[in-house]
Image: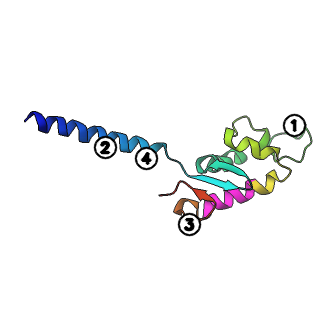
Amino acid sequence: MGSRTGLGRLLGAAVVLLFLLQSTQSVHIKYRGFQVQLESVKKLSDLEGQREPSPHLQPQSHLPPVCHHPALPQDLQPVCTSQEAASIFETLRTIANDDCELCVNVACTGCR
């Protein structure tokens, strides 16, 4: 009977480990040299819809307003260094909204 208890504990530990491994894997989008998490791109739309920053409060620049948002996910911040940040953000949103979660888009990695 002792061997069954040990086997049960081992199986239970394996299930917990598999669950933890699965939850830590995330889908990444690679586009124009940037690699960002799908969840970060989903937050991008939320940030853009929150509030329009006053043009008097931010410096005039070619950057999209979301680049000045303090809650912009860290993995999206390097995109703001690009001259094409607005178009890159737009493409990332398109990829995330269309096919990425279905793991059809070639720009996505980490799909199962």
Q: Nearer the viewer, mark 1 or mark 4?
A: 4
For the residues bearing labels 3 and 2, Cβ distance under 8 angstroms: no
Task: Estimate the x, y position of residue 86 in percent, counting from the top left.
Answer: 80, 53
Question: In 3D space, how far apart are the residues under numbered discs 1 and 4 (Cα atoms)?
Answer: 41 Å
- Looking at the image, tell me whether mark 1 or mark 2 is earlier in sequence order: 2
Helix, strand or loop for disc 1: loop
Q: Earlier along the polypeptide chain: callout 3 or callout 2?
A: 2
Label 3: state its secondary structure. loop
Amino acid type of the residue that numbered disc 4 sits on in the rendered structure: Gln
The x, y position of residue 47, in whole percent, is 69, 44
What residue is shown with label 4?
A: 22
Q: Amino acid at mark 2?
A: Val
Query: Which segment did they paint magenta?
Result: 89-98
Query: Would you say residue 51 is visible in this rendering?
Result: no
Residue found at the very far front of the displayed protein? 3
- Residue at screen point 69% across, 56% down: 92
Q: Which residue is mark 2?
A: 15
Label 3 packing within 10 angstroms: few (<14), some (14-19), many (20+): few
- Residue at label 1? 58
Residue at mark 3: 104
Image coords of residue 58 (percent x, y): 87, 37
Query: Residue 3 vs residue 51: left or right?
Result: left
Q: Nearer the viewer, mark 1 or mark 2?
A: 2
